[in-house]
Amino acid sequence: MESSVNGGGVGGGFSHLQSCGDSSEEELSVLPRHTKVVVTGNNRTKSVLVGLQGVVKKAVGLGGWHWLSKGSVSTPRGTTKVDLSKLEMAALWRYWRHFNLVDAIPNPSKEQLIDVVQRHFMSQQMDELQVIVGFVQAAKRLKTVCK
């Protein structure tokens, strides 16, 4: 069984695709099959679909229609683990200074620094879609600067 979603506009309402290779704006109007997507939609998109993740099964250029199989649609899960112990000391120190965590421990060891940074990192509330939107916008800016 398949469901269809009209996103309209560039990216067909599904933005922030995870695919290989470079893509121009024109190429993003129809997403290739098997592309992982997040539904952002527009004013015509049903609100229950916004934020869902899926895989493109079929796309039509006119109108920006994209079909996702119901089995491939899933809600984002927040179970991703981050191992901050893999970071170098310099990166941990930058994080520590950037978020002004200096009051926690005056001169921490790497283990203490990882602990403080981990607790602070996990306490941050994130809107995943906004993070993805910001990342894609930054990537597009970088792409235009590099041309």
Image (cartoon, rainbow, N blue to C red):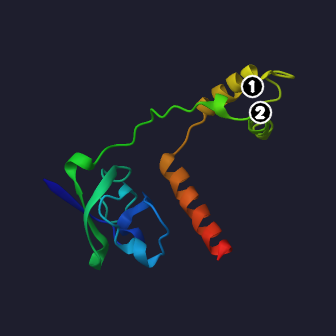
Q: Does residue 53 lie above or below 137 as drawn?
A: above
Q: Position of residue 101 (x, y in %)?
A: 78, 30
Mark 1, other Cα within 10 Å: few <14 / some 14–19 / many ≥20 = many
Identify the element where label 1 is drawn.
Answer: helix
Q: Does residue 6 lie above or below 98 as drawn?
A: below
Q: Position of residue 73 (x, y in %)?
A: 28, 48
**Disc with the residue nearer the chain's start (2 vs 1):** 2
Q: Does residue 25 lie above or below 39 as drawn?
A: below
Q: Residue furthest left?
A: 1
| Location of residue 39 by image quarter | bottom left
> What kind of residue is marked 1?
Leu
Q: Residue furthest right?
A: 106
Would residue 26 be found to the left or right of residue 106 on screen? left
> What kind of residue is marked 2?
Met
- Dot label at residue 113: 1
For the residues marked 2 and 1, what is the alpha-carbon distance in whole angstroms?
A: 9 Å
Would residue 22 be found to the left or right of residue 8 on screen? right
* Residue depicted at 59% across the width and 30% down the height: 83
Q: Position of residue 113 (x, y in %)?
A: 75, 25
* Residue depicted at 59% across the width and 63% down the height: 139
* Label 2–label 1 contact, CB within 8 A: yes
| Location of residue 46 by image quarter | bottom left
| Location of residue 74 by image quarter | top left
- Dot label at residue 89: 2
- Dot label at residue 84: none
